[in-house]
Image (tube, coloured by chain):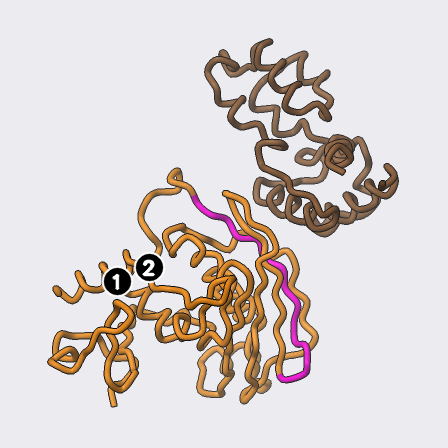
Amino acid sequence: MQRASSALTREHLNGSACRRNGGLRFPNGIWPLKVFGMRWFWIDRFEKFVSGVEAVSIKNVTLSEEPLDDYLPGIPHYPHSLIIEGMAQTGGLLLSEIEQFQQRVVLAKVTKAEFFSIAEPGDQLRLTAKLIGRQPEGAFIEGTVDVGPKRLAELELTFAILDESFGKEPFFVPCDLLRILRAMKMFEVGVTQTGEPIQIPPHMLAAELADLNL
Amino acid sequence: MATSDEIFQKVQAALVDALGVEDDEVTPEATMVGDLGAESIDFLDIVFKLEKAFGISIPREELFPDDILTNASYVKDGKVTSEGINELKKRLPWANLSNFEQNPRVQDFGNLLTVDDLCRYVAGKL
């Protein structure tokens, strides 16, 4: 089986790739994921994604993760700061998807972060981000984090949408972001507000094909 | 119809939440930037909180007339012209511009908004 951490090469396409929904899909359903430097993904996958409204992501906490080792020796738990970052990624992608991932969205302010317990190895966090308000310069997300029936945290995050005065370069290489979003199952669970599946933005598909020299 | 007291209490709660200040710091006369320490990103947060608290929509240009303050026909030598002041009065009828008019430096505009101005603005939207 193709490991998720290996780079995508032309050999992977060697007669086995097929086109589906305008994109490329491997027969075993596993997408190779190119990894750039340190991983900074604090959610594992999307469970629900309603464009411009709400996103629910899952984060599995495991003892094999380095952040649990050093944060508080002897009491391994998943740091609150990384839970906030996971909510920022969930909410940030919810916001970015509205404009086809072509806006540069940054977490500008953690307005509220209230934690009721700690996340321990073996816990599965369910992060729910709701888009409460959106303006041309930014957006406001309300988030909850649950472990099973237990509420672990409540968050409020303010995002800024950067204009060209902050530069023009995108934060992510479009084809790399596309692979990450596929790995997170965004396009498998994502729907519009009327219930139709969300589509991969054409510019991302074009970038991916260009990256593959196709 | 909300009373002015009810409006003030909701505005106060939004500012306490967004700026991490104490209730008693949020007086009607307090300026948002100078007294309460609001920074640009805080205004975005405050706008969302007010929209939610009052069920209103707040377009940015109604609170922050950047287009007037950066328009060469309304600004000369870093100061807002009399035509610019008239435009500001039309756009922000709820704001008290009397002090600003005496020395209308563009750079001082950001510190003009008071809690009372914000309450008047919200009252006009309800």
| Residue A200 makes an appearance in the image | yes
Disc 2 sits on a residue from what chain?
A: A
Q: What residue is disc 1 on?
A: A205
Q: Specify the amino acid type for callout 1.
A: Leu
Magenta span: helix, strand or loop, mainly? strand
The quadrant of the rendering that contains the C terminus of chain A is bottom left
- Give the color of chain B as drawn: brown
Side of B17 relative to A37 (left or right): right
Seen from the viewer's position, the closer of residues A131 and B46 is A131
**What SS does tag 2 mark?**
loop
Disc 1 sits on a residue from what chain?
A: A
Q: Residue at x 44, y 76 (%)?
A: A45
Badges 1 and 2: C-beta atoms under 8 Å apart?
Answer: yes
Using the image, determine if residue B124 lies above or below residue A84. Answer: above
Q: CA distance from mark 1 to mark 2?
A: 7 Å
Which corner quadrant of the image does residue A33 belong to? Answer: bottom left
Side of A182 relative to A1 (left or right): right
Residue B107 forms part of the magenta stretch: no
- Give the color of chain A as drawn: orange
Assess disc 1: are there few (<14), some (14-19) or many (≥20) residues with their C-alpha within 10 Å of its C-alpha: some
**What SS does tag 1 mark?**
helix
Side of A187 relative to B63 (left or right): left
Which numbered circle lies on residue A201?
2
Seen from the viewer's position, the closer of residues A4 and B24 is A4
Seen from the viewer's position, the closer of residues B60 and B98 is B60
- Image coordinates of residue B65 in percent, x first then y, are 57, 27
Which corner quadrant of the image does residue B87 belong to? Answer: top right
Q: Which residues are magenta?
A: A148-162
- Image coordinates of residue B44 in percent, x first then y, are 60, 44
Q: Residue at x 67, y 25 (%)?
A: B92
Assess disc 2: are there few (<14), some (14-19) or many (≥20) residues with their C-alpha within 10 Å of its C-alpha: some
